[in-house]
Image (spheres, rainbow, N blue to C red):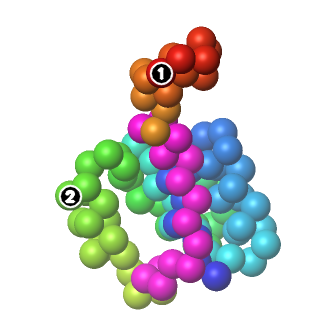
Amino acid sequence: MIVFVTGASAGFGAAIARTFVKGGHRVIATARRKDRLLALSQELGDALLPVELDVPDEAAIKSAIAALPDAFRKSTYSSTMPAWRSAWNRRSRRAWTTGTT
């Protein structure tokens, strides 16, 4: 399986990338912090492809996908760590903390 993980430079994203690689899968690890992605790649080897990517930038996503090597083109699973941030807007936070919208 090929897994596409966003937010892979730290925290849950990095843990998810490690888990899948250690389970024998290939991982496309994306994040904004290239230095941390490269460190993760050195740790996990060729099964992890580091891709510097800022998820809110739609053009960057299209460009990154178009540039994937053939061995990583058929992603079958996606784990998107920062996606909750865009959904967790001010209105959602206010509703969560005060019970109002």
Could you tell me which residue is drawn at 43 percent across and 82 percent down? 73
The vertical placement of 29 against 27, above or below, is: above
Can residue 70 be seen here? yes
Residue type, numbered disc 1? Thr
Mark positioned earlier in the residue sequence (2 or 1)? 2
| Residue 101 circle label | 1
Residue located beneath label 2 in the image: 59
**In this picture, which residue range is highlighted in magenta?**
72-86
Q: Residue furthest left?
A: 59
Residue 2 colored in magenta in the image:
no
Can residue 39 be seen here? no
The vertical placement of 27 against 75, above or below, is: above
| C-alpha separation, residue under disc 2 versus residue under disc 1 | 32 Å
Q: What percent of the width, then of the height, locates residue 27?
A: 58, 69
Secondary structure of residue under mark 2: helix
Q: Decide if residue 81 is on the left or right side of residue 68.
A: right
Residue type, numbered disc 2? Ala
Q: Decide if residue 23 is on the left or right side of residue 7.
A: right
Q: Residues within 10 Å of mark 1 (few under 14, many from 20)?
A: few
Q: Quadrant of residue 21?
A: bottom right
Q: Residue furthest right?
A: 23
